[in-house]
Image: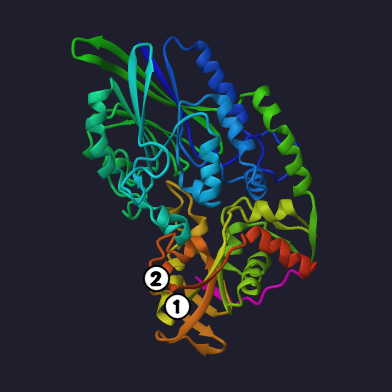
Amino acid sequence: MEIKILATSDMHGYIEPTNYAEKNSDLPFGTEKIATLIKNIKKNATGPVIMIENGDFIQGSPLSYFLAKNKRVGELTQVVNALGYDVGVLGNHEFNYGLSYLKSAIASYNHPVLAANIINKEGQPAFGKAYDLIEKEGVTIAILGLVTQYIPHWEQPATVKDLTFKSIVETAKEYVPKLREQADLVVVAYHGGFERDLVTGEPTELLTGENEGYQLLQEVSGIDALVTGHQHREIATHVQGVPVVQPGYRGSHLGEITLEIEQTQEGFKVNESKAAILSVESVQVDEEIKKLIAPAGEEVEVWLDQPVGKVEGDMHITDPMVARIHEHPYIEFINRVQMAASGAKISGTSLFNNEGKGFGSVITMRDVITNYIYPNTLAVLKVTGADLRAALEQTANYLILDEGKVVFNPEFIMPKPQYYNYDMYEGINYTIDMRNPAFSRITKLEFEGKPVEATDELEMVINQYRAVGGGNYEMFEAGKIIREIQIDMTELIANYLKEHPVIQATTNQNFTVLR
């Protein structure tokens, strides 16, 4: 008998094949195209098909942002329900709009939501179930749902209060032996990825516990298939003999694991397994899903075209790397918005990816939300001068010299681009000297015209993700937060533009990167 496991992960609210930069796009991603693949596979399948939604579905696109702001999560989850998943798994970004919205999403799904390693005060899985047992054509398949344990390092403390996030390895060691007794096959669906090279076993990132997929397969036997996500990678392989998939980002690929099984006296046995990721490159959209989301999609396009401000001068980003090493008017603008909203005199922000284009002469909501892509709120921290210097050294480590040219450190591009972890600051004057060794590159650091001393106490504003240490900024933590601005940045930007309808594309060039 042939059993297929189909998995999506990290769809991030991209239902239609567009990145919202312009109208009427037909790009190679989106749930509408994934739906076509799924229906074709199910139609031609010779045996049971198991479908898993592996997290990060309700956040990430202008569509999902718009629906969240209007508390209309059901218009997103109806798409998931129409596809007929057997189970879903929570992702880390499911928490971004708060617990109330998350619980509304979970309640609106037709399938169980799994998260075995997120535990409440009573010691039980806090959301839905730990696992589900599915019986198809006489075969019992157990699906264990796991989520990256690193969520408290990114989320507002109030959101994760009273929740315990356990290691997935520890959790799997508890559950997999029990599931082997109850089921013929054990599948693990993990909203997390791999911390080591899958061939050599060499670490590919700091071993913080954010990704534990490699350790899981090294230490836990009895897993027949592993679905992963979170890193937005495209993976289809075998590790320790276990078929593994990770199907990219935004619905660019569908993960497919095929298990050939036979019944023996001891029960069902896997004779052969295959892992594949299927691209939607040449796939047409599914008309049923398109029709479901079209009303909301049309509303979003109208909303995105609303003008919210004007620019005098040039605020376009033509080269994202240049914008990181020479202060850009867009970056200075974002920092000014953060300072105005918080009252802090020092601000740090990032250029999150290489897709943002900055602002033209007329700023629309489309420009705002396709440049500032995360639903961040802001936090003001009280830090020491030593903390600030350490943060600047950390940010400088995201750059290297390559034949005399400053480039983004490739260690932080593969396996997942981390452009969002390189920060640029306003309110201080500083120099990064790339000729110096890592973590000794800050040769100038001044605040209000005076050198910053290690014992100085300073207030600074950064986004919530960074404020609790996200991006391995260990000098920042929740305990240093002295106030929060509970309005997300997209709204803060729009509000700032209402007060300042014409902005100047200027910079004060307060930082220098020497090569």
Quadrant in which the N terminus appears? top left
Asked whether, in this view, residue 174 is left or right of residue 46, the answer is left
Where residue 19 sits, quadrant-wise, is top right
Q: Residue at x 44, y 59 (%)?
A: 471
Q: Which of the numbered marks, if any, corresponds to residue 258?
A: none
Q: Which of the numbered marks, if any, corresponds to residue 475?
A: 2
- Farthest residue in the left direction? 266
Residue 468 visible somewhere in the drawing: yes
Q: Which of the numbered marks, if any, corresponds to residue 383?
A: 1
In the rendered view, would you say 511 is above or below 31? below
- Label 1: element kind: strand
Residue 280 visible somewhere in the drawing: no
Image spot of residue 186 (x, y percent): 30, 27
Which amino acid, by three-letter code, is at mark 2? Met
Q: Which residues are magenta?
A: 504-515
In the rendered view, would you say 415 is above or below 208? above
Whichever of callouts 1 and 2 sits on the residue coming sooner in the sequence is 1
